[in-house]
Image (tube, helix red, strand yellow):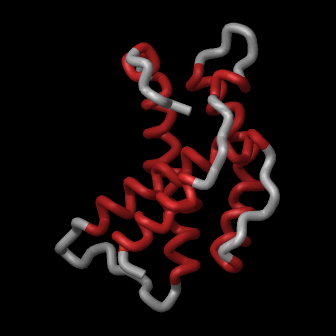
Amino acid sequence: MSWRELSDFLHRQRTEISARPIYEFAEVGEKAADTFKRLEAATRESLKTAIREFARTRKWPPLSDEQSLVLYFRLSQGVDLAMALSQNKTGLFSTRENDESEMIRWALNEAWEYPGLPNTVRFLSDRRHLDSGEKWN
């Protein structure tokens, strides 16, 4: 699997997720970024396990609404990261052609800690995205 193929694969997974909008999980007066941080912390370990299972079986285990929302953001970051790496011509980020499961785990778990999580929090903190009517899930 190339990085481009991984990006396409993760994009297909993302389109199959029905994630409720983040504002539906907000507590009274809570900002989107704070809601996200709370949900991400609450689902972090269970999603890591679900992603490892998915990487092995290519089937998602049952997920809660909170897990589905955070997974949507993880998949979004994974799509963008894999697409960026597909443009890399230096060979620094070689694919693991014989270990697609490892590529999925890396893009959705390990790369989530950095840059995925901080970039998502920064995105949700930027009011311009929220005020523009852009879909921010």
Which residue is pictured at 38% across the width and 57% down the height? 81
Q: Quadrant of residue 28?
A: top right
Out of 111 and 130, give the one closest to the viewer: 130
Q: Is residue 102 above or below residue 84?
A: below
Give me the residue at 47% from left, 58% from top: 11
* Quarter of the rendering occupied by the C terminus: top right
- Point out the residue furthest to the top here: 29
Relative depth, front residue between 123 and 59: 59
Look at the picture and state if 131 lies above or below 104.
above
Q: State the image coordinates of residue 55 (x, y, percent, origin top left).
A: 63, 74
> Total of numbered circles in the picture?
0
Q: Position of residue 93 (x, y in %)?
A: 32, 73
Q: Position of residue 75 (x, y in %)?
A: 53, 54
Which quadrant would the N terminus be assigned to in this image? bottom left
Q: Which residue shows up at 52% across the image and 81% down it?
A: 100
Q: Residue at x 51, y 61 (%)?
A: 12
Q: Is residue 77 left or right of residue 110?
A: left
Horizontal side of residue 92 vs 108, given as left or right:
left
Q: Quadrant of residue 86?
A: bottom left
Q: Is 125 placed left or right of 82 in the picture? A: right
Identity of the residue furthest to the bottom in this view: 98
On screen, 133 above or below 72? above
Image coords of residue 79 (percent x, y): 43, 57
